[in-house]
C-alpha cells in the first residue's frame, strides 16, 4: 500500500470513528435524559460533538508531531540557524508550567470549573513573551548589510559562523536526455529543493518542498535554441560519449542509480 | 443530568490526554536531541567567536527556578479557585534578569562591533 492510500485509509478510519462516536453521543443523550426538553438535548449533543471534533483534531496534530509529519525540530531555533534560542526556551518553559498548572487545578477541583488567573501570572507570561519578541527584534535589526534575513556580522544570535547546515545534496545526470537533477535536503528545516536543468532547452525547474507547501519555479536561461533540425542531427552523436569512456567515464555521466553525497 | 456529567468527565479526560501528549512529545524530542539545545548558553563576541555567556546562564537559572517553585506551589495545593499568584518581588527579579539578558544581547549586537571598529 503506497503512502497516499495509507493516508486516505487513515483519514477514513478517523472520520468513521468520529461519526460513530457522535451517533453514540446522541443515543446516550436521548437514553439517559428522556425527560429533557429538545433544546436541552440539542445543547448536550452539540457539546459532545464539539468535544469529539476538538479531541480528534488535537489527536491528529499530536500524532503528526510524534511521527515527524509536523516537524518541530526547529522549535527552539531561530530560522536558518542551528543554534538554540534562550528566548524561545524560556517562553516554552513558562507556557508549559502555566498550562500544566491550569490543567492540574481544573482537574483537582470538584465540581470542575475554570480557575481565576491572577495578574502575577499574566505579568510573568507578558515578560516572557516580550523578551522573546524584543530578542527577535534585536536579532533581525543586527542582520547586517544583507537585510533582515542576511548573515549577521555583529555577533548576535543570527550569525554567519554558525555550525554548517545539515544538508544532503544528490546530483543525478540522465544519460539519455542529459537532464541534470540536483536534490538538496535540509535535515534541520525539513525543506527539500529539487533543481532540474535541461541543457538542450536551457530550462531550469526549481521545486521547493517545505513540510507545509510546495513552490515550483521554471526559468529558461539561456534562451532555447531554435528548433530547426535539432531532432534529426543529434541522433548519431549519441554513441560518441562511449569512446572517451576510459578517460573519464564516471564523473561525466554516472548511471541513473549513482549519486553523490556532500554535507 | 447524567449525560452532562459524562460529557464533563470526557472533556476533562480529553484535555488531560492532549495536554499530556503535547508536553510529552516536546519533552521527549528535547531529551533525544531531536529538538536541539546546542549553543543555548553561547553567544558571539565582536570577533565572531562563540563564547560562553553569563547573561544567558543567569536567565536560565532564574527561569528554571521560578518555574520550579511555581510548579511546586501548585502541586502542593491544587484544590483552589485560582492559580497560584506570583509575588511582585519575584516578578521584579525576573524582569531584571530578562532586561539584563536583552541588554547583553543588544550590546553584543550593536555596541560590540562599534567598539571593535574604533579599535
Image (cartoon, grey):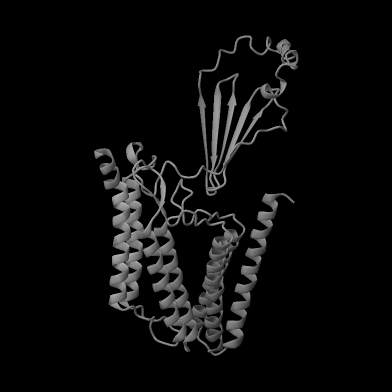
Up-down relation of residue A231 to residue B89 (above or below): above
The C terminus of chain A sits in image quarter = top right
- x%, y% of residue A157? 39, 49
Residue at point 52%, 48% (across, down):
A189
- x%, y% of residue A253? 69, 23
Query: How many marks can you see?
Result: 0
- x%, y% of residue A108? 49, 85
Residue A53 seen:
no
Residue B42 seen:
yes
User: In the shown orientation, is residue A235 left or right of residue B85?
Assistant: right
User: In the shown orientation, is residue A67 left or right of residue B48?
Assistant: right
Up-down relation of residue A104 to residue A70 (above or below): below
Q: Nearer the viewer, residue A164 or A119?
A: A164
Residue at point 72%, 20% (across, down):
A249
Residue at point 32%, 61% (across, down):
A130
Q: Nearer the viewer, residue B32 or A117?
A: B32
Q: Residue pushed farthest front?
A: B119
- x%, y% of residue B79? 44, 88
Quarter assignment of residue A113 = bottom left
Q: Nearer the viewer, residue A109 or B101?
A: B101
User: In the shown orientation, is residue A198 left or right of residue A135?
Assistant: right
Up-down relation of residue A206 to residue A158 (above or below): above
User: In the shown orientation, is residue A153 left or right of residue B24?
Assistant: left
Up-down relation of residue A43 to residue A19 (above or below): below
Q: Residue pushed farthest left?
A: B118
Amino acid at each position: 500500500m503506497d503512502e497516499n492510500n495509507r493516508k486516505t485509509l487513515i483519514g477514513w478510519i478517523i472520520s468513521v470513528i468520529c461519526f460513530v462516536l457522535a451517533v453514540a453521543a446522541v443515543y446516550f443523550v436521548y437514553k439517559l435524559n428522556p425527560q429533557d426538553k429538545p433544546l436541552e438535548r440539542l445543547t448536550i449533543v452539540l457539546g459532545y460533538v464539539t468535544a469529539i471534533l476538538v479531541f480528534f483534531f488535537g489527536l491528529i496534530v499530536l500524532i503528526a508531531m510524534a511521527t515527524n509529519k509536523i516537524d518541530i525540530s526547529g522549535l527552539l531555533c531561530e530560522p536558518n540557524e542551528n543554534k538554540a534560542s534562550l528566548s524561545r526556551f524560556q517562553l516554552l518553559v513558562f507556557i508549559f508550567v502555566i498550562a500544566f498548572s491550569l490543567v492540574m487545578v481544573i482537574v483537582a477541583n470538584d465540581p470542575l470549573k475554570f480557575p481565576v488567573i491572577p495578574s502575577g501570572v499574566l505579568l510573568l507570561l507578558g515578560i516572557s513573551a516580550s523578551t522573546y519578541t524584543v530578542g527577535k527584534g534585536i536579532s533581525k535589526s543586527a542582520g547586517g548589510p544583507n537585510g533582515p534575513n542576511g548573515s549577521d556580522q555583529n555577533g548576535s544570535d543570527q550569525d554567519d559562523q554558525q555550525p554548517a547546515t545539515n544538508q544532503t545534496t544528490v546530483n543525478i545526470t540522465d544519460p539519455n536526455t542529459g537532464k541534470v537533477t540536483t536534490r538538496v535536503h535540509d535535515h534541520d528545516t525539513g525543506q527539500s529543493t529539487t533543481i532540474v536543468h535541461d541543457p538542450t532547452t536551457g530550462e531550469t525547474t526549481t521545486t521547493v518542498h517545505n513540510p507545509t507547501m510546495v513552490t515550483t519555479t521554471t526559468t529558461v536561461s539561456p534562451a532555447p535554441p531554435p528548433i530547426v533540425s535539432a531532432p534529426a542531427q543529434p541522433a548519431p552523436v549519441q554513441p560518441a560519449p562511449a569512446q572517451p569512456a576510459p578517460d573519464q567515464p564516471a564523473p561525466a555521466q554516472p548511471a541513473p542509480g549513482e549519486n553523490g553525497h556532500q554535507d | 443530568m447524567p449525560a452532562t456529567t459524562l460529557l464533563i468527565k470526557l472533556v476533562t479526560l480529553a484535555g488531560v490526554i492532549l495536554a499530556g501528549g503535547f508536553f510529552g512529545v516536546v519533552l521527549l524530542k528535547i531529551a533525544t536531541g531531536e529538538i536541539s539545545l546546542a549553543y543555548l548558553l553561547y553567544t558571539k563576541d565582536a570577533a565572531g567567536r562563540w563564547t560562553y555567556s553569563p547573561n544567558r546562564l543567569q536567565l536560565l537559572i532564574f527561569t528554571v527556578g521560578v518555574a520550579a517553585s511555581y510548579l511546586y506551589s501548585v502541586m502542593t495545593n491544587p484544590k483552589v479557585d485560582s492559580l497560584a499568584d506570583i509575588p511582585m518581588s519575584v516578578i521584579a527579579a525576573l524582569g531584571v534578569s530578562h532586561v539584563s539578558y536583552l541588554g547583553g544581547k543588544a550590546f553584543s549586537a550593536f555596541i560590540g562591533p562599534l567598539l571593535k571598529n574604533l579599535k
